[in-house]
Image: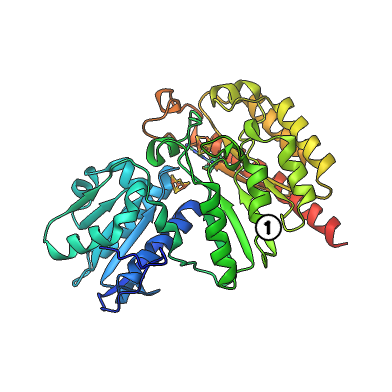
Amino acid sequence: MQHIDESGGYGKNTVKKGSVYIRTIGCQMNTRDSEVVKGLLSVEGYEMTDDPKKADVVLFNTCSVRDHAEQRVWSGIGLLSRKKNRPLIGILGCMAQNFKQEIFQRARAVDLVCGPAEIDNIALYLEEALKKQDKVLAVDERRRREEIYHTGFYDKRNHAYIVVSEGCDNYCSYCVVPYVRGRLRHRPAEEIVREAQAAVDAGITSITLLGQNVSAYLTEDRVCGFPALLEKVAKVKGLKSLSFITSHPKDTKKELFEAMRDIPVVRKYLHMPAQSGSDRVLAMMNRGYTAKIYRELVDLYRSIVYNGELSSDFIVGFPTESEEDFRATHELVKGVRFDSAFIFKYSARPHTKAAELPDDVPQGTKKRRHAELLELQKSISQSLKHAKTA
Ligand code: SAH
Ligand code: SF4
Ligand code: F3S
């Protein structure tokens, strides 16, 4: 069990318990969760290693957002399980929640399955898995204990990811996240500030606030929204750079742009995924805005945040996406001129609304649209970079 010292932080357990390697797949949420797991296991006496060959325990912190991400994990497990002296294998993160006990049937070598909401007890589950020669399954959906964010463990010496909210309630029709990460829960503002203060006191100067949709942040008493949270964190003495991801267009308002303009340490960078430029597809995606509304929001951002950077995500090949829909996305990318954009081929996901529709855009068409949009974005990114350095 974790032992919490009098200061409320985690005391160090000096007993050596073996070495752990964690492979992280997926978004920055997972990067942060892996840090939390490393922190919790380190205080319990485990040693972290960068070499999977030498590890007694290999944990995969997994992602279910696209099929490809899951395939990488199945093949990773396959490789490990063929080893003679294989390590204990654990599956953490979104695939754990997506497949639950089915993982043990699909991959018999797996010893431990622990969903994202349960990582606060990872030390306990790992100990159980190591002791009893039986499988351990922990996939309850509940709120994590707040203290787990305060072990002070960050991968980088100069940068900290700090979670502001867990889960997501938006139910975009293509997206598995609400089903694997659960309902939206906001951390209390004072806990976020306390974590930021401790990180800066430990020498960190750059912080990124994390949430599936940080723009919707609101404290329980409904007093502190995201712009006010930025202001609070920015007051931490010694902090030099404050970033945040991700902003959903439907919740992103003028006040956020004003905060970006007015608070010097806030990085002038906005990641605000558009997903598509076709109103028909956007409605089917349940995104809650049209291409026109999106463009107006970008205009507002650029009029308030001088020289602000902007990036986006797009999905091509959503069910029923026609050539005309794709052209509308192409137009949006061309018109807005993002500094950068991630472009994904649609992948049908279990539990989601869109998975009930036939995945009817042929692979070849998805591939072509993906390549075309990528090419366009590449040339825009290059010319914008060129203009900035000239
Ligand atoms: N919370 C963030 C993004 C989470 S997932 C947001 O709302 O923007 C990161 C990106 O993966 C999404 O922005 C989307 O572009 C992409 N994505 C999500 N589900 C997908 C799916 N089923 N197929 C392809 N790409 C997907
Ligand atoms: Fe998924 Fe939409 Fe939530 Fe982002 S906002 S995590 S795309 S459901
Ligand atoms: Fe992130 Fe992938 Fe889970 S994008 S929240 S790790 S499904």
**Would you name the residue on which mark 1 appears?**
235
Instruction: Give me the residue at 27% from left, 58% from top.
Output: 90
Give the quarter of the image for residue 159.
bottom right
Quadrant where the C terminus is found in the figure: bottom right
**As rendered, which of 349 and 149 lies closer to the eye?**
149
Instruction: Give me the residue at 23% from left, 68% from top.
Output: 87
Q: Is residue 319 above or below residue 5?
A: above
In the displayed orientation, state which residue is furthest to the front: 6
Count of residue discs: 1
Quadrant where the N terminus is found in the figure: bottom left
**As rendered, which of 162 and 176 lies closer to the eye?**
162
Q: In this view, does 203 lie above or below 24?
A: below
Residue 259: % across, % down? 74, 46
Give the quarter of the image for residue 202.
bottom right
Instruction: Give me the residue at 53% from left, 46% from top.
Output: 211
Instruction: Give me the residue at 54% from left, 32% from top.
Output: 317
**What residue type is disc 1 on?**
Lys
In the displayed orientation, state which residue is furthest to the left: 133
Residue 244: % across, % down? 62, 51
Is residue 339 found left or right of 2 in the rendered image? right
- CA neighbours of label 1 inside 10 A, class few (<14), some (14 to 19), many (20+): few
Judge whether residue 308 can be spotted in this image. no
Residue 113: % across, % down? 26, 52
Colouring convention used in this rendered image of the protein: rainbow
Judge whether residue 259 can be spotted in this image. yes
Is residue 244 found left or right of 186 in the rendered image? right
Q: In this view, does 355 lie above or below 18?
A: above
Callout 1: helix, strand or loop? Answer: loop
Is residue 55 found left or right of 295 in the rendered image? left
Residue 269: % across, % down? 71, 51
